[in-house]
Amino acid sequence: MDDAQVRALGSVGTAIELGGYVGIGKTGVITSQFDRLSASLSYRKDVASGHKSTVLAPTINYVTPLSLRAIAGVFVSAERVGEGYADRYFSIDQGQSLASGLPIYNARSGWKNWTLGALAGHSISGDLRSGWQLFGTVVYRKLLNDFADSPIVARNGSSNQWLGALGVAYSF
């Protein structure tokens, strides 16, 4: 979306996020000996001048083969962000308010969003373990708290975000 008020807020510096990821998973949990339930936690910190803050993201995934040709999965995740992230991307200072016409706003750190997604895959070659596959995904994200209340979102955007994607993969 191209919005004149949001554009008038100015650009932000580039964030370079470095971090880590830990997770645990178990195979053979619910539907078969091949399904997988996993939980993970990622932590990222901006090491450049983008937001000079952190992002913490817990995720739960469940994936199950439906047959040798098809697979399906779901996931749920959330993001908790630091003060710098909230301020850089969702706050509006006095200068930005004058330039854009949007009200001054001070976003605080906290839970930024939760996300729910689904994935489906189908083997073109007949076996998911090797050859070509087609994949599709649909993802819904809901902005929360100060992030949803920011005028950037509440007046000029939406706290409800949808994403769909199709892809091709090759396994060998």
Image (cartoon, rainbow, N blue to C red):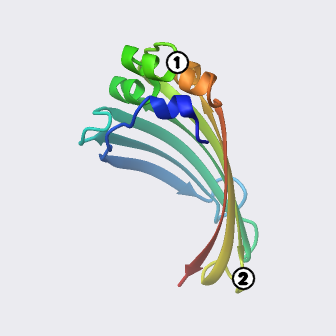
Residue at screen point 48% across, 39% down: 58
Residue at screen point 41% across, 36% down: 56
Q: CA distance from mark 2 to mark 1?
A: 53 Å
Q: Position of residue 148 (x, y in %)?
A: 58, 23
Residue at screen point 40% across, 33% down: 10
Say which label, 2 or 1, has the lower sequence index.
1
Callout 1 secondary element: loop
Relative placement, left or right, of 94 versus 156 is left
What's the residue type where badge 1 is placed?
Gly
Callout 2 secondary element: loop
Q: Position of residue 101 (x, y in %)?
A: 52, 18
Q: 46 or 28, which lies in front?
A: 46
Please tell me whether mark 2 or mark 1 is closer to you in this view. 1
Dot 2 corresponds to which residue? 124
Q: Please say if 123 is above or below 9.
A: below
What's the residue type where badge 2 is placed?
Ile
Q: How many neighbours does mark 2 have within 10 angstroms: few (below 14), some (14-19), or many (20 or more)?
A: some
Which disc is residue 60 wearing?
none
Q: How many neighbours does mark 1 have within 10 angstroms: few (below 14), some (14-19), or many (20 or more)?
A: few
- Let me know if residue 15 appears in the view: yes
Dot 1 corresponds to which residue? 101
Q: Quadrant of residue 89?
A: top left
Q: Position of residue 49 (x, y in %)?
A: 25, 38
Q: 123 or 3, which lies in front?
A: 3
